[in-house]
């Protein structure tokens, strides 16, 4: 089955374990996820199965939205609740206005140093393995973008906020940096991912209910969508509903299937607002999902094939 599943990951299991459970439930031979959630975190974990695993980069690049709870007054070595407390502040003398101002100061383009307790690799080895041995690996700061950050609740020492951010943003590190700017220290206490691009937590499925929902049935050629009303399990075509599409002429179908480029003259329709580098779903005249292509950077009327599904 070539599916994209909007899973609401529960607490206390890894993202890998969640994928394994999905594979077992739907008897998928191949599956992967689009962005790790820490074991203590909950919320959206997009799981791709079958041919849909090839779509992972398109979903990984989407914006992410979280509800985070940070604890002020303490800093840990992991920047979250499971770490060792390395700094502690006596008394938390901050006002609501100060917290709001500091949160808003992080909106826009910011630099983050990836935490040592992360899955990023150094010479093929995850950083957290070095961290567990007390080895600190130099890391360069990385540019990320905070589109919006809003204070939701203050119940000192806990502060709850919502954040919409770019790919690659570490919410643990964001809490740590907020704590520094407040002068109190802070670590991430709870985390829920409530959105990835157009995928929302209200449209997700749990592991408990996964086995009882109707699974979209599509042919190997990715045609019909008989289960459009299923909000939490998507065919490849519906999962990419936000991506523009074109239909090529019948004479060009084989060219697409063979991975060859096509031009605007090979298309039945061509959106006028496409820009160089944009990704495009490419279909046959009768709607068969053939490939994902993109416009050449130096030629706005030529499309190269990035993924071919046949």
Image (spheres, rainbow, N blue to C red):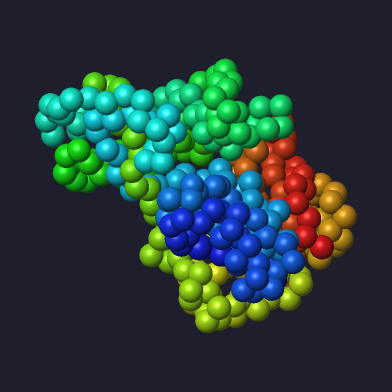
| Residue 141 relative to residue 94: left or right | right
Tally the marks. 0
Whether residue 88 is situated above or below residue 258 in the rendered picture: above
* Quadrant containing the N terminus in the rendered view: bottom right
User: Does residue 239 appear anywhere in the picture?
Assistant: no
Whether residue 296 is situated above or below residue 112 in the rendered picture: below
Q: Position of residue 101 (x, y in %)?
A: 20, 28
* Quadrant containing the C terminus in the rendered view: bottom right
Whether residue 13 is situated above or below residue 60 in the rendered picture: below
Image point (40%, 33%), residue name? 84
Name the quadrant containing residue 297: top right
Whether residue 298 is situated above or below residue 257 in the rendered picture: above
Image point (55%, 21%), residue name? 136
In the image shown, does 40 or 232 lie closer to the viewer? 40
Q: Position of residue 159 (x, y in %)?
A: 23, 40
| Residue 40 relative to residue 104: left or right | right
Q: Position of residue 285 (x, y in %)?
A: 73, 68
Q: Position of residue 189 (x, y in %)?
A: 33, 43
Image point (41%, 36%), residue name? 83
């Amino acid at each position: 089955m070539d599916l994209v599943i909007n899973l609401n990951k529960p607490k206390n299991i890894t993202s890998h374990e969640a994928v394994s459970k999905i594979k077992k439930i739907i008897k998928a031979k191949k599956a992967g996820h689009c962005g790790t959630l820490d074991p203590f975190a909950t919320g959206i974990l997009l799981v791709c199965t079958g041919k849909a695993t090839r779509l992972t980069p398109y979903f990984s690049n989407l914006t992410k939205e979280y509800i985070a709870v940070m604890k002020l007054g303490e800093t840990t070595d992991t920047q979250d609740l499971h770490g060792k407390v390395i700094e502690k502040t006596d008394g938390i003398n901050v006002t609501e206005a100060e917290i709001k101002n500091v949160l808003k100061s992080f909106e826009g383009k910011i630099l983050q140093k990836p935490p040592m307790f992360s899955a990023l690799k150094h010479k093929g080895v995850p950083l957290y393995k070095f961290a567990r041995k007390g080895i600190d690996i130099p890391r360069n700061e990385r540019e990320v973008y905070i589109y919006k950050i809003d204070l939701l609740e203050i119940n000192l020492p806990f502060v709850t906020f919502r954040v919409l951010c770019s790919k690659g943003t570490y919410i643990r590190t964001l809490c740590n940096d907020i704590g520094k700017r407040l002068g109190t220290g802070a670590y991430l206490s709870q985390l829920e991912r409530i959105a990835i691009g157009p995928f929302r937590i209200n449209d997700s499925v749990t592991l408990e209910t996964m086995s009882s929902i109707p699974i979209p049935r599509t042919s190997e050629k990715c045609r019909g969508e008989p289960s459009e009303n299923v909000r939490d399990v998507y065919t490849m075509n519906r999962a990419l509903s936000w991506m523009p599409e074109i239909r090529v002429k019948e004479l060009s179908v084989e060219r697409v299937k063979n991975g060859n480029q096509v031009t605007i003259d090979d298309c039945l329709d061509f959106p006028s607002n496409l820009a160089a580098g944009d990704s495009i779903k490419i279909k046959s005249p009768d709607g068969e999902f053939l490939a994902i292509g993109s416009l050449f950077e130096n030629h706005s009327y030529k499309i190269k094939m990035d993924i071919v599904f046949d």
